[in-house]
Image (cartoon, helix red, strand yellow):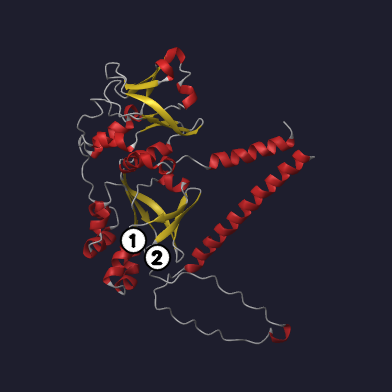
């Protein structure tokens, strides 16, 4: 292998490994699957699909989903039915028509969940006459419920999204599923060092918004009791509505495990986000250390209080300060170098005027983190462009 080919290979490898699949984004390009896409998110199957390295999703259009929803299954039973439509193997459109002996038995996420009795979580894929391919649940007496319609998206051999004609029938998947025990967020926090924050949620009424979002997925960043104690003078100066926004800023309306936070660095919307105000922050990680940057300050995750999907609660070492309520940290202006003739004179620096908005006590560290991230991003882009130029130059020699 020539040096140019080697360099190009590693460059392509760099790009290919940095972009994991996202089923929500894939289906968002196809409005006919909007209901299916919505329920993958609501049941948390979307995040489970995204964590898998090899997966096939048998997508149902809005008409097929309407038929399924008419059965009025609980959300937990609906998750079992939809997980039967997610194969833990890769089947592209080409592979469907090249099945050995014309039939294959493959496992699904329903089987992997441990909720499927026996082999009820397996799907039969069968080549039919006229070039058609049929799908049926293993426990459905060999009946073919649906046929392959078209390929929606394929990233060999990572993810394949195939449309099938209708829902796969399974009495086991549709069996009533017990609702998990209710999670009491404020009780969880109160017992593990975040009682002060929990008390603020209850007193302000913000706890209702947190609780409403648990079933759909919720990530909470909880400042510990000593942190809240130090923050109370600032908190008391806020109006009632701003107090609620301040507290809602500590919740993200989606389940984000620690591994997901590390692999999905970037902007996060919060429970405080509305049309007029972003109320977002940026997730960053340096190895095992995960930080939350708000443009006003930077907080660090110091532990996990509770991780029971759809709820996860983290401890953080600072109260998150949104730029909508507090003055953002600005980079200090560079002072002009004194001339030699004035270098020995002493000048008194005037005190900076106090801002109307509360300010974080230690912004310097936060600003340094922002600057470091910016330089790292710039250096990364220069490196990629340099490697591309090198490859092209060598290939043209």
Residue 264: horizontal and vertical position, in percent? Answer: 46, 48
Q: Residue at x 45, y 22 (%)?
A: 96
Numbered label tally: 2
Residue 396, quarter of the rendered image: top right
For the residue labelled by badge 2, is the local secondary structure a helix, a strand or a loop? Answer: loop
- Against 84, residue 188 (above or below) is below
In-image side of 65 versus 364 (left or right): left
Q: Residues within 10 Å of mark 1 (few under 14, many from 20)?
A: many
**Furthest residue in direction right, as rendered:** 397
**Furthest residue in direction front, as rendered:** 130
Residue 178: horizontal and vertical position, in percent? Answer: 20, 35
Q: Quadrant of the N terminus?
A: top right
Residue 40: horizontal and vertical position, in percent? Answer: 34, 39
Q: Residues within 10 Å of mark 2 (few under 14, many from 20)?
A: many
Q: Residue at x 66, y 49 (%)?
A: 385
Q: Say the numbered circle drawn on residue 272.
A: 1
Residue 252, quarter of the rendered image: bottom left
For the residue labelled by badge 1, is the local secondary structure a helix, a strand or a loop? Answer: loop
Residue 268: horizontal and vertical position, in percent? Answer: 41, 55
Q: Nearer the viewer, residue 270 or 99?
A: 99
Q: Residue at x 37, y 21 (%)?
A: 134
Dot 1 or dot 2, earlier in sequence: 1
**Furthest residue in direction top, as rendered:** 101
- Against 219, residue 359 (above or below) is below
Q: Residue at x 62, y 77 (%)?
A: 335
Q: Quadrant of the C terminus?
A: top right
Measure the C-alpha gap from mark 1 to mark 2: 10 Å
Q: Which residue is mark 2?
A: 322
Q: Nearer the viewer, residue 15 or 363?
A: 15
In-image side of 70 versus 57 (left or right): left
Pair 1/2: label in front: 1
């Amino acid at each position: 292998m020539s040096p140019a080919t080697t360099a190009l290979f590693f460059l392509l490898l760099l790009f290919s490994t940095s972009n994991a699949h996202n089923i929500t984004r894939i289906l968002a390009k196809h409005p006919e699957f909007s209901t299916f896409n919505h329920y993958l998110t609501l049941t948390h199957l979307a995040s489970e699909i995204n964590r898998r390295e090899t997966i096939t999703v048998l997508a149902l259009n809005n008409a097929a989903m309407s038929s399924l929803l008419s059965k009025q299954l609980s959300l937990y039973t609906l998750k079992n039915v939809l997980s039967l439509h997610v194969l833990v193997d890769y089947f592209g459109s080409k592979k469907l028509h090249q099945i050995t002996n014309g039939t294959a038995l493959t496992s699904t996420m329903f089987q992997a969940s441990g909720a499927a009795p026996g082999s009820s979580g397996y799907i039969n894929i069968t080549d039919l006459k006229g070039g058609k391919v049929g799908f049926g649940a293993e426990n459905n007496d060999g009946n073919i419920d649906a046929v392959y319609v078209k390929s929606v998206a394929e990233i060999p051999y990572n993810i394949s999204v195939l449309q099938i004609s209708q829902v796969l029938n399974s009495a086991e998947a549709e069996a009533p599923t017990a609702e998990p025990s209710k999670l009491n967020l404020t009780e969880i926090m109160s017992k593990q060092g975040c009682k002060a924050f929990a008390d603020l949620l209850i007193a302000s009424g913000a706890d209702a918004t947190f609780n409403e979002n648990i079933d759909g997925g919720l990530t909470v960043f909880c400042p510990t009791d000593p942190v809240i104690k130090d923050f109370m003078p600032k908190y008391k100066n806020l109006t009632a509505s701003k107090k609620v926004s301040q507290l809602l800023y500590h919740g993200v309306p989606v389940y984000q495990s620690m591994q997901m936070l590390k692999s999905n660095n970037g902007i996060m919307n919060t429970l405080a986000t509305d049309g007029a105000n972003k109320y977002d922050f940026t997730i960053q990680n340096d190895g095992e250390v995960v930080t939350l940057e708000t443009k006003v300050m930077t907080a660090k995750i110091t532990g996990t209080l509770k991780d029971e999907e759809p709820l996860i609660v983290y401890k953080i070492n600072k109260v998150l300060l949104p730029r909508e309520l507090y003055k953002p940290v600005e980079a200090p202006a560079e002072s002009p170098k004194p001339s030699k003739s004035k270098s020995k004179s002493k000048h008194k620096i005037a005190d900076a005027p106090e801002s109307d908005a509360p300010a974080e006590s230690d912004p310097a560290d936060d600003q340094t983190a922002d600057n470091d991230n910016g330089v790292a991003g710039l250096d990364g882009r220069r490196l990629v462009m340099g490697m591309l130029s090198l490859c092209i130059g060598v290939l043209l020699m």
